Amino acid sequence: MIKAFPTSFDQPRLSRRRAALRGLLLVLLAGLIAWGAAALWFDGPSSRWLAGLLATGFVITMSALLLLVRPFHRAVLAVLAAFLIVLSWWLSIPPRNDRDWGFDFARLSRAAIDGNIVTIHNVRNFDYHNEADITDRWETRTYDLDHLRGVDIFLSFWGPTLIAHTITSWEFDDGPPLAISIEARKEKGESYSALLGLFRQFELYYVVADERDVIGVRAVHRGERVYLYRIRVALERARALLLDYLKEVNRLAERPRWYNALSHNCTVTIRYHAQHVAEGRPWDWRILLNGRLDELGYKQGRIDTSLPFPELKARSEITEKAKAAYSTPDFSRRIREGLPDPRTPSRQ
C-alpha cells in the first residue's frame, strides 16, 4: 500500500487557509468588541466619564487578550466569555413607561373590545400650526368592525429614497380612518438616531392617531414626501390585523418593550403582525430597505397592478393633496381622491 504524505506544495496552501480563517475570526471578534464597547458607552452609566472609561477599558482589555494570550484559541474563548457577560447585562436592561416623555409621546393608548365595537382611549389628534405652535388633543374614539372597509399603507420619505417610514391605516365606511404608526418613543429634548436605535435608547411606541395628525405633520410641517397605497386583502384579515395591533397596544401599556432599528422598527414589526394573522411571505431585502416596499407589494400583487408600476407610484404620491386638505374636515377622503383601489371593480 502506498501512503500519501503532504508534499512541500501542500504546506503553504494549508498555512494560507489557516491564516484566512484566523483573519476572518479576528474580523468577527473585532465586530463583537466594537459592539460591546458601544453598548457600554450608549447604555452604560449615565456618567459619560464612567461610560467612556468602561468602553475604553473593554476595548483595551479585549485587544490585549488577543495579542498576549496563547494559544490563540484560549484568547478567543476569553474574548467570547467577556462579550457574553456584556451581552447578558445589556439584555437585562429593563424598558420603562415612566420617563419624562416628549409631548407627542406622553400618553399610551388602550383599546377596549366588546364584540364588534372597539373603543380606543388616547387617540392622538394634534393640530400642528407650526413647529413651535402645537395644540395637543387626545381623544377617545369608537369603531364598529362591521364597518371596516380595508387597510392602507403610507410610505413617508424624509430624505434617502431607500428608507421610508411606514404607517398602517384602517378605513371605515361610517367614520374617519384609524392610523397606527410604530415609532421610537422619545423623551423631552431627545431626537431620533438610527445608530442609537440599535441600542437600548428608545422604547417601542404605537402612535394611534387621526390621519390628519400623523400624515399631515409629515407632509405639511416636516417636508416629507408621502405615498398612499390601498392594500388588496380580505376584510377578515384586515380585521384580524387591526385586532393584533390593538393587542400589542394594550400589552405595551402594561409591559413596555425596547424599540430596535433592525429588529423592531416601523416595517419589521408590521411583518410580525402580518405573520400572526396569515401565512408569512419569504423574507425580502426590501423589508429592511423599506423605501422599495411598494415594489415588493406590486410584485406580490398586494397593491394595484392594473397600471405600470411607475405610473402607479406617481399617482400614489399624496404630498400636495395632504397640504391642500390639511385644514379641512375631510382630509382622509381628499388624499384618496383618484387613487387606484384594487378592492373595487373599477380602477380608473
Image (cartoon, rainbow, N blue to C red):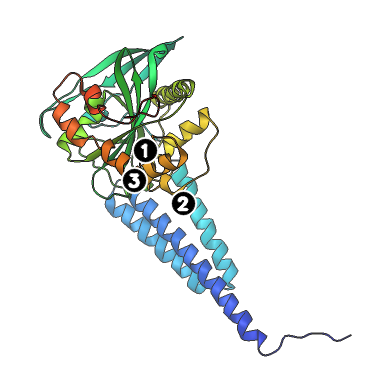
Q: Are marks 2 and 1 in contact (CB under 8 Å)?
A: no
Q: Tell me the kind of residue under disc 2.
A: Val
The disc label shown at residue 86, or none? 2
Cα distance between the residues tagged 1 and 3: 12 Å
Query: Which numbered disc flags the more N-terminal residue, 1 or 3?
Result: 1
Residue 223 position within the rendered picture, expressed as x and y whole percent measured from the top left: 17, 40
Position above or below: 296 against 30:
above
Position above or below: 294 against 4:
above
User: Which of labels 1 and 3 is toward the front?
Assistant: 3
User: Which of labels 2 and 1 is toward the front?
Assistant: 1
Mark 1: secondary structure = loop
Task: Give whichever of 256, 154 is nearer the camera.
Answer: 154
Residue 119, quarter of the rendered image:
top left
Task: Give whichever of 15, 148 is nearer the camera.
Answer: 148
Residue depicted at 54% across the width and 74% down the height:
20
Kindly identify which residue carries mark 3. 291
The quadrant of the rendering that contains the N terminus is: bottom right
Query: Which numbered disc flags the more N-terminal residue, 3 or 2?
Result: 2
Residue depicted at 67% across the width and 90% down the height:
8
Binning the other alpha carbons within 10 Å of mark 3 as few (below 14), some (14 to 19) or many (20 upward) gives some
Kindly identify which residue carries mark 1. 266
Residue 203 position within the rendered picture, expressed as x and y whole percent measured from the top left: 35, 36
Residue 151 position within the rendered picture, expressed as x and y whole percent measured from the top left: 38, 26
Residue 319, quarter of the rendered image:
top left
